[in-house]
Image: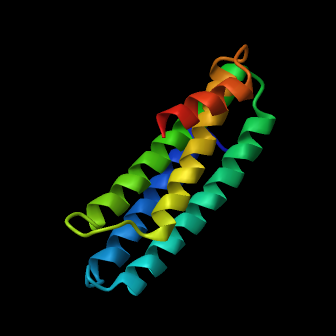
Amino acid sequence: MQLLLTDLEHLGQTALKDFGREAAQVNSCDQIELEKHAQRLEAKLEQLYAVAATMAQREDSIEGVAAIWAGMVSICDRMGKALSDLRRGQAGRLPSHDRILDIRNACEENRVLHHYPEISSASVLHEASSRS
């Protein structure tokens, strides 16, 4: 059975819904408990990344590969926003939030490499580092 881009999107939405339910039950000042839930979200994102990588390897077209990674960027963005919204008004970010953003950057790099195959990874890395 082959997974589709819509399946990947559904898995991301499910992970976000689960996180939202769990986080709603936690006191927003309880940093340790929030980080535990954020770590679970991060672990699910890592699993999705592995699924996306497998899907990309099996994809026949370069456009399809770019679409897979674009979908992952979107999932990462929504997860990052969920964590930002959770911490709104509080100083600092959860450590898992930074790692989710790292995964997002890896997905974006893969998207650009497959969307613009003539661009080298060195130029993508240079562009990403100049934004920081």
User: Does residue 2 appear anywhere in the picture?
Assistant: no
* As drawn, 76 above or below 32: above
**Residue 109 appears in which quarter of the rendering?**
top right
Q: How many labels sit on residues?
A: 0
Residue found at the far top of this picture? 118
Q: Is residue 59 left or right of residue 70?
A: right
The percent coordinates of residue 23 (x first, y second) are 33, 75
Residue drawn where x is 29% and y is 66% of the image: 86
Q: Nearer the viewer, residue 41 or 101?
A: 101
* As drawn, 131 above or below 120: below
Residue found at the far left of this picture? 89
The percent coordinates of residue 117 (x first, y second) are 72, 18
User: Does residue 43 appear anywhere in the picture?
Assistant: yes
Residue drawn where x is 78% and y is 25% of the image: 60
Q: Nearer the viewer, residue 100 or 57?
A: 100
Q: Is residue 36 left or right of residue 20?
A: right
The percent coordinates of residue 70 (x first, y second) are 54, 34
Q: How is the image coloured?
A: rainbow
**Residue 128 appears in which quarter of the rendering?**
top right
Residue drawn where x is 49% and y is 50% of the image: 10
Q: Is residue 47 left or right of residue 83?
A: right
The percent coordinates of residue 79 (x first, y second) are 42, 55
Q: Nearer the viewer, residue 125 or 41?
A: 125
